[in-house]
Amino acid sequence: MNQDILFPDLQEWHGSSQLVSFPAQQCGALIQCYISKSQLEHMTGLPLLAEADVMRAFDSLRFDIEEMASSAIEEQNFAADGGIYIGQHSAHYRGTP
């Protein structure tokens, strides 16, 4: 993992958009990152029916998720809103969570 990118232990579920948001910090800049519920289900191989299930999956996969976000940041794969979206259909989610 790139040591220049920091991930505070903060995350939030957005039920209406089916995304978990989590911040990253690079050179003092705050970058909002998102991962879709469908991507978490794909990564766990389990249906995530409740918010608690989604957040538990996020916590258990945090290292892998941060690696994916770091790679996307390093590749400057930013959405139009400046965020990083991780998911099977991430282009679909590139709106406001």
Image (cartoon, rainbow, N blue to C red):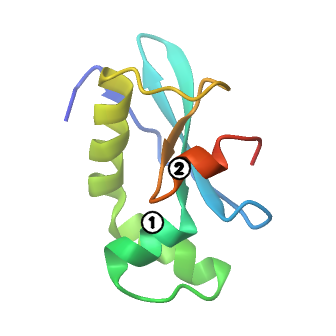
Label 1 crowd bin: few (<14), some (14–19), many (20+), radius 10 Å: some
Task: Mark 2 or mark 1: name the one nearer the start of the chain.
Answer: 1
Q: Which residue is mark 1?
A: 39
- Residue 31 in which image quadrant: top right
User: Marks 2 and 1: CB-CB under 8 Å?
Assistant: yes
Q: Nearer the viewer, residue 39 or 91?
A: 91
- Residue 64 lies, with reference to residue 91, above or below; the image says below
Query: Where residue 50 sits: x, y (%)?
Result: 65, 85
Label 2 crowd bin: few (<14), some (14–19), many (20+), radius 10 Å: some
- Residue 68 lies, with reference to residue 88, above or below; the image says above
- Residue 15 in which image quadrant: bottom right
Residue visible at 48% across and 76% down in the picture:
56
- Residue 16 lies, with reference to residue 45, above or below; the image says above
Residue visible at 31% across and 23% down in the picture:
75
Query: Where residue 66 sits: x, y (%)?
Result: 34, 45
Q: Is residue 60 left or right of residue 36?
A: left
Q: Is residue 51 left or right of residue 85?
A: right
Mark drawn on residue 90: 2
Q: Nearer the viewer, residue 44 or 2?
A: 44
